[in-house]
Image: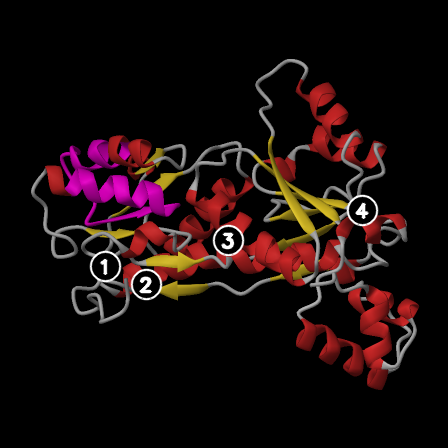
Amino acid sequence: MSVLTIKDVAALAGVSPKTVSRVINGEPHVRPDKRERVLRVVGELDYRPNAFARSLSSSRSYLLALLIDDPASGYAADVQLGALMRCREKNYHLIVERVERVAVDWQNELSRSLRGLNLDGVILTPPLCDDTALAKLLEKAAIPFVRIAPSGAESASGYVRMDDASAASEMTRHLVALGHRRIGFIKGDPAHGATATRLQGFTSEMERSNLTTDPVLIREGDFSSRSGFVEADALLALPDPPTAIFASNDDMALGTLMAATRRGLAVPQTLAIAGFDDAPSSRVTWPQLTTIHQPKAAMAAEAVDILTNPEYRDHCADPNYRRAIEYRLVVRGSTDAGAGATPGAI
């Protein structure tokens, strides 16, 4: 079979190759009827433009990079999937790079790697999204970037985030509504901006509910299941232990569930457990975890949409490139015995 070319698509759609190129690259200034014809032909032929040829015919490489801190985390897996699927839809390629900032010369190493890639853009995930040195490195290299879930808007770039503080407040409100008054809270890695905002949401809601936030009930984890186990075990060893524990991510909530199981505590009858993120692991334990659904894949897809906008490079500071994605509270059996798994929920 002969390889389809952009000229074949143009001929069948009755337009010029330049028009086909504009439609494929998402550029403006194409009449709706022509755009519709091109997209119909592209779909019928299952046409996939050659990335090398595209890069030669334009100033873009059609290559994006996703920079991550911990590739083994469930968070990173969801973000990668969301970015990859959206890149595939837009005929872009995605590479994933781990940034290990413990090395003394990490900035020089990363700078060398980026220079050799000719990237169209970079997606920064937590906690890299809050690293000012990394942002300056990308700005110096003239590589546009979008941050996922930054703690602030210090850098003149686009970002995609959800309201972590409001989400943590809603989870706390859920626990209070169930009758819990002595609630433990396990913080995450202090290097992540979300750690402080989730704690803020918890403490603010406790105050609004006229409840005392006992400092003894607030423990510092690092977002790992092991830290959740260790810190939850310490909470449960107190003379007056909490009746509910809100861990600020699902991995730590799973560690909390293990600590409760080790002590023979019934969940949620004796101890309610709540997490945050709605990771796949939250649905494959028993009882399933009550959590906050953070649309990680959707945020990554939105970041790709921003980076692939032809106008973004010259307007990175435009507020229109700062997006908010909605979260939702997901109530399951770890806080409400009546909310057990339903058929097909796993």
Question: Label 3, on which residue?
Answer: 164
To which residue does mark 4 refer? 61
Question: How far apart are labels 4 and 2 at the CA level?
Answer: 48 Å
Residue at image location 88% in from the left, 48% down from the top = 56
Residues drawn in magenta: 231-260
Where does the image place residue 277, in percent across and percent down from the top left? 42, 52
Q: Amino acid at mark 2?
A: His
Q: Nearer the viewer, mark 4 or mark 2?
A: 4
- At mark 2, the secondary structure is helix
* Real-space Cα separation, disc 1 to disc 4, in angstroms: 49 Å
Is 212 within the magenta?
no
Amino acid type, callout 3? Asp
Looking at this view, is 149 or 190 the one in front?
A: 149
Q: Is residue 316 visible?
A: no
Helix, strand or loop under label 4? loop
Q: Which residue bears the numbered disc 1?
A: 335
Q: Which residue is label 2 attached to? A: 174
Q: Nearer the viewer, mark 3 or mark 4?
A: 4
Say if mark 1 contacts mark 2, CB within 8 Å.
Answer: yes
